[in-house]
Amino acid sequence: MEMKKLTPVLVVDSIQPCLDFWVGRLGFTKSVEVPGPDGKTGFVILNHGPVELMYQTKASVAADIPAFAKETLRSTLYLEVADLAPIRAAIAGQPIVLAERTTFYGAREIGIREPGGHFVTFAEVSEGK
């Protein structure tokens, strides 16, 4: 069995605040955008080098997969970065959920709640860990 790729799909009420954060603050690019049933953006794919993230609105999920419409969908992201310094600047003003720390496994981490409500941990991992 060969696994090729795993891309999180985060379900949110509205995509625009998420774009302001991921594209505006962190430099991701929008490679795909699909309108939802309300005419606003219903689905996007965001990329930053090899990192890929997808967002879909609750309304779009309900129209696409009705069985998911009443589900409570939750996600967290763990994003390894080369250096936390530019991340600190980019996330200024976002709600800090995990104060910056160094873990027993050698990672420096900081966690925030992004505009869609999901928890994101940014981690700078020491070489050899």
Image (spheres, rainbow, N blue to C red):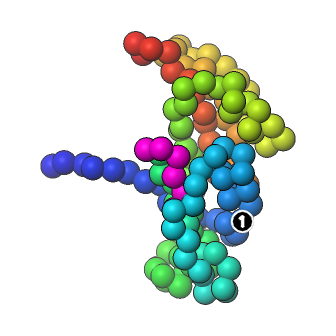
Q: Specify the quadrant of the image occupied by residue 129.
A: top left
Q: Which residue is mark 1?
A: 16
Residue drawn at (51%, 21%), measured in percent from left and top?
Answer: 125
Residue found at x 74% / y 60%: 17
Most prominent secondary structure in the magenta stretch?
A: strand
User: From what the image shows, is residue 6 above or below residue 78?
Assistant: below
User: What segment is highlighted magenta in the picture?
Assistant: 45-50
Q: Is residue 17 visible?
A: yes
Residue at (55%, 30%) from the top-left corner? 81
Q: Position of residue 88 (x, y in %)?
A: 73, 30
Q: Position of residue 5 (x, y in %)?
A: 33, 50
* Along the viewing direction, whichever of 70 and 52 lies nearer the viewer: 52
Horizontally, residue 89 falls left or right of residue 62, namely: right
User: With 15 as the anchor, is 61 left or right in this view?
Assistant: left
Image quadrant in which you'd find residue 103: top right
Residue name at image x 44 percent, y 14 percent: 127
Residue nearest the viewer, comparing 21 with 66: 21
Q: Residues within 10 Å of mark 1 (few under 14, many from 20)?
A: some
Q: Closest to the observer: 39 or 74? A: 39
Extreme residue in the left direction: 1
Kind of element beneath mark 1:
helix
Residue 74 appears in which quarter of the rendering?
Answer: bottom right
Q: Is residue 108 left or right of residue 65?
A: right
Residue 95: give x, y in percent of width and height: 79, 42
Location of residue 100 with respect to 122 vertically, above or below: above
Say whether residue 46 is magenta.
yes
89 in the magenta segment: no
**Of the residues shown, which amino acid type is indicated by label 1?**
Gln
Instruction: Say above or below: 66 vs 5.
Output: below
Q: Judge by depth and name the residue closer to the eye, 95 or 46.
A: 46
